[in-house]
Image (tube, grey):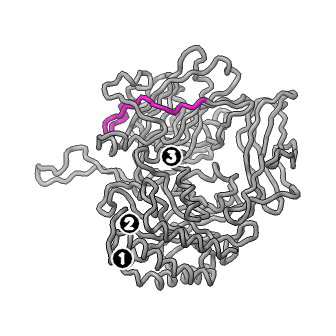
Amino acid sequence: METKMLKRKSLFREYKHKSSCTTSLINPETVVSPENGDKEVEMKDEIIIKKCNSVQNNPQFTVIFSKDQKKLVVFLKDQKKYFVWRNERRFYDQLDGLWTFVREERNSPSVGINNKWHLLDLSQFENATVMPVPAAYNDLTADREVREHVGWVWYQRNFFVSIRDKSYRHFVRFSSVQYHAVVFVNDKIVGIHVGGHLPFEIDITGHVSFDNENRLTVAVNNTMTSNTIPPGEFRYIQRKYGESKQYSDGFFKQTWNFDFFNYAGILRPVYITRKPFTYIDDISIDARADGFFGYKVNVVSNTQFVRIQVTVLDKYATVIFENNRYHYTGRINNIRPWWPRDMGAPVLYNFVVRLTISGILIDVYRLWFGFRTVSISEDQTFINGKPFYCHGFGMHEDFELHGRGYNPVVMTKDLNMLEWMSGNCYRTSHYPELIERDRNHPSTIMWSLANEPQSSDPTARPYFSDLINLTRTIDPTRPVTAVLAASFSSDQIGDLLDIICINRYFGWYIDTGYLETINHSWVFEVNNWKLRYNKPIIVSEYGAEALPGLNQDPSHVFSEQYQQELLKQTHYAFDILRKTHAITGEMIWNLADFMTADAVTRVVGNHKGVLTRNRQPKMAAYILKNRYENLEKMKD
């Protein structure tokens, strides 16, 4: 299960233009305009990025306009999320390791961009150091200013491109940069990306040298505002009395409207990838448990002589389907469906696309997929026609030292601990653009469009109506949900959703310390949601914080004993609700403790995890393990 937050129109200032575009904002004071050579264009306000259908007959690029509609830059690629695997026709070099790192002053007015730092060797700067990629930079020094930095930082490293690869397109692929990224190759700006957590790719074919070493420079800004997703607030603060001032001039506060630390930097691997000039750009697959099979392949090509061959193979490499069309809808007989854990085998098939010109292989891409159907009734969720009760975890990508940086060791530990506790699902939290990346994965069973939105606001209904319709247009095969925190009596959007997810913290935020209220409160809450909407309901968050090793008997809030007792009381209520099919799933918040901003309600982070931040089980983990094991047995 995935949580998906799409860009909210209400968070972006719309800017009308004669073409159909989507807008978002970034805030460097200057950019370099390719149309004006290396001349800087000074900006006193926001730069407005407009994602347009086509620019100069090339659908890859985006135009950047100033508020007076003067065109500034044409360079941003409309991103695809597919990884470039090494194969017969595709190659990549990984640029992970130690990069030169330079930090500007907090909230500086884009000093590096104004002074063209990308033309300089940053390792010669007095404050230059090195930073590992991938990793967040915040926790890797003993300097509090680095941890709390707001504004621009710069990364730089060199790379080679072989002269043997002149016949290929070259791209730089960033798997995640938080949050604004301005990318330079050698002396040119090649792209800007807005948004963290997920990959973006920029065509640098015309900017690399085959005779000399190339320089890759990335300026990264982590400032969060009401226009970012997730949002934050940036404001200058001053209090005066007569001639005296409480704060020094320029003092500001950066606050976040989300409960996790804003780890920043280059958080996932970086690649220089090579593709043919005619290449496979996008694949969409619809494969269902009854054998229904459809696909669509998009190809970038400047010739009409390209030919396509699509093949589907089983795990024994036996061909079960062949076609030479770019799109297809039909059936494949005698398939084996994909199942989640403890319901059957997770059978996968290999979708292989080959492009040829005059019989010569030009490009190939392989994608594993499964035949799987998700459906719902008014009470339950079904996988391939069988009832599926979701019991699992909400989770953040967070760990000591590297923060939100990619770490396959931690990911492996997380999945093994999830399996140890017999969980069968988890909710990723709360990253945009997942539909495009993950729509072909059978393990993704629904899309969640928001976490705790203000769904009682009268403007919520038209906004979410548009958002839900858009999601169903992109992917009509999965249920759509949103995680709600508003009251069942004031909510405005529940009837628009396929499944209702609710977050409630009875015994913690609500009636703190009164464990005896939990049972009645949950039954009251869920039954009233059910009465109003008659939709399947998943409890997407519940729980309590427990400081590791804090023992108190009789129990007290923040002790491990209190977390245990709250879980037991909550599970009694869930058993009552399960018997009447009032709920179709339960997910505790959270799998593991994670870091947050400084707050008097957060003792060095959020401690609602049943695992510590370094993935050791608290006492509550054994309660949950026993709970989920019993739920598995009830299926038999």
Q: Position of residue 162 (x, y in %)?
A: 63, 19
User: What quarter of the picture does the N terminus occupy?
Assistant: bottom right
The reply to whether residue 628 is visible in this rendering is: yes
| 1 or 3: mark nearer the eye | 1
Q: Position of residue 272 (x, y in %)?
A: 59, 30
Mark 1 or mark 3: which comes first in sequence? 3
Q: Position of residue 523 (x, y in %)?
A: 52, 83
How far apart in space, not on screen, are marks 1 and 3 (Cα)?
Answer: 36 Å
What is the three-letter code of the residue carrying label 1?
Thr
The reply to whether residue 462 is visible in this rendering is: no
Mark 2 or mark 3: which comes first in sequence? 3
In the rendered view, would you say 265 is above or below 514?
above
User: What quarter of the picture does the C terminus occupy?
Assistant: bottom right
The residue lying at 53 percent from left, 18 percent from top is 213
Question: Relative to the observer, which residue lies in front, 30 or 410?
Answer: 410
Q: Is residue 599 left or right of residue 309?
A: left
In the rendered view, would you say 443 is above or below 61?
below
Q: Look at the image and give the residue range highlighted in magenta.
A: 93-112
Disc 1 and disc 3 in contact, CB within 8 angstroms: no
> Mark 2: few, some, or many residues within 10 Å (few <14, many ≥20)?
many
Residue position marked by numbered label 2 in the rendering? 546
What is the three-letter code of the residue carrying label 2?
Ala
**Which mark identifies residue 453?**
none
- Residue 97 lies within the magenta run: yes
Residue position marked by numbered label 1 in the rendering? 512
Question: Relative to the observer, which residue lies in front, 179 or 53?
Answer: 179
